Image: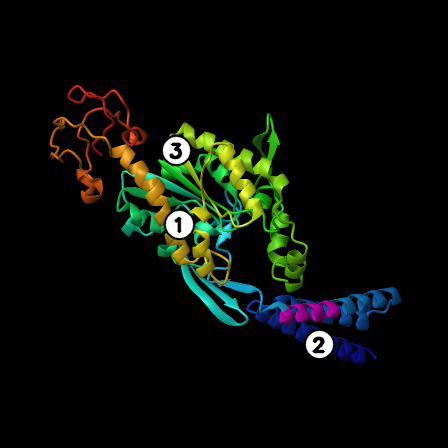
Amino acid sequence: MSRKIFRLLETRLTALALLVATSVLFLEHSAGMDAPFVIYFLVAGAWAIIIAVLSRREFLRKAALLCGSALFCLAVVETYVYYTTKSQVIITRTTQQAWRRDTMGFGDFPVPNMAIEFKQFLNGRMIGDVTYRIDANGLREIPNAVQGRPYEVAFFGCSFMFGHGVEDDQTVPYYFLREARGTFEGFNFAGEGWGPHQMLREVETGFIRRVAGAPDLAIYEAIPDHLRRVAGRAPWESGPKYELCRSEEACYAGPFHSTYYETSRRWLDKSWTGKFIENYFANLSRPSDIPLFLAVLKKTRSLLEQNGTRLIIVLWDQNELAKTMLKTLRANQFDVIALSSIFPDGDLKTQSLTQADRHPSPATNQAIATYLWEHVGGSWWQSAQMPLCPMKPVLRANQKPLGDLPDVRKLDFQDRRSTCEGWTSGKSARKRPVFGASCQGKREPILEAL
């Protein structure tokens, strides 16, 4: 009798071990699948059925059968949703799955010193294969070939400014610096899925100052979806939370969600059923979000201006909500460039501004950057350089004479020097002209030796 019990126990343990091994293999295989939740539901349903078979208690057997049936039904629903919607949903894959972390309270922030291969697939066909290079500060790299001095520009925004689906040398920051021809150093502070609240938090915490000092220009690329992001209604939102307080001022109120929410969110984001429900019941931006959006931008502008940084906003004004945003920003004296100014209606009818993933194409990024340089960067640079002293310049020790109207873009870095006195020492002071210079009796803004 005892031998029969032993053999029965041995058989059950062997079967259990095989089931465990099979489950582990299936789960490992599911990691590379487009619809891993199908496997998750099938494995969980199988275990529920096994528990029902082995259970002696009636209520436990019924409960396990019910759970197993529900899990198998979910597997069928997940499979159906996958095959009916996969031709409309872009799947992304990266060489480093966890290439972003919430380590500084900004939301998902790139891990420093990484190179990520970013691939996109639509209906089984690869539509994008680019590489993101992240520098030591966690910022998207701007190639050194276009970096310059002595001025600095900081770029802010979401995936549009970050450069979703394009190479490092196809982003707005890259094209802007290329147009600057060695007169600006740039920093890409944008992030995937971000909004203006991340920009404000980067400024508030001193992160911008630690990385870039006091930039001369700040360029923020805005889209209507930023309204719901700043209000915390975007499903992926993990950034800082701001609320209206004290005379409609934006006040920091901690993170939007806990780490437990973020973990479960990343897990459930793999479900096609979850994506379908999320898209169907999407809580989109609305006009009532504009006051908070405006308050965040006002506080950001105020903090930047304290360090002498000028804020420029580029707004994608392609719907009525965006046009309302544009009117509100201009009514509050923001420097705003509407996308319709860069691409007239005629151009929009003959060309697409976005790629298949609905993010700006390299050509669009280049056009935006060129417009920004021609209408903002170039004029700012000229105002910082001109007018120079019409009289004979006062040269410093070991300084080369540069002529009456030097073009610093044509000079070596060490030769970008001043032609007159009138700047105080220090990094921020050297880049901002002051009046009252001693220059052959005439007061003019000039450059200091670097």
In the picture as drawn, the residue positioned furthest to the right comes out as 58
Query: Could you tell me the amino acid type at mark 2?
Result: Ala
Q: Is 268 drawn above or below residue 55 in the view shown?
A: above
Residue under numbered circle 2: 15
Q: Mark 3 or mark 2: name the one nearer the start of the chain.
A: 2
List x then y, in percent, for residue 113.
39, 52
Residue in the image at 65% along x and 61% along y: 276
List x then y, in percent, for residue 336.
45, 39
Q: Main secondary structure of the magenta part?
A: helix
Q: Indicate yes or no whether the magenta region holds residue 436.
A: no
Residue 54 located left or right of residue 419 = right
Residue under numbered circle 1: 368
Q: Is 244 drawn above or below residue 314 in the view shown?
A: above
Q: Nearer the viewer, residue 18 or 387?
A: 387
Q: Nearer the viewer, residue 283 or 319?
A: 319
Q: Mark 1 or mark 3: name the one nearer the start of the chain.
A: 3
Q: Mark 2 or mark 1: name the one nearer the start of the chain.
A: 2
Question: Helix, strand, or loop for circle 2?
Answer: helix
Residue in the image at 35% along x and 40% along y: 376
Q: Is residue 88 visible?
A: yes
Residue under numbered circle 3: 309
Q: Nearer the viewer, residue 279 or 144?
A: 279
What's the magenta region? 72-84
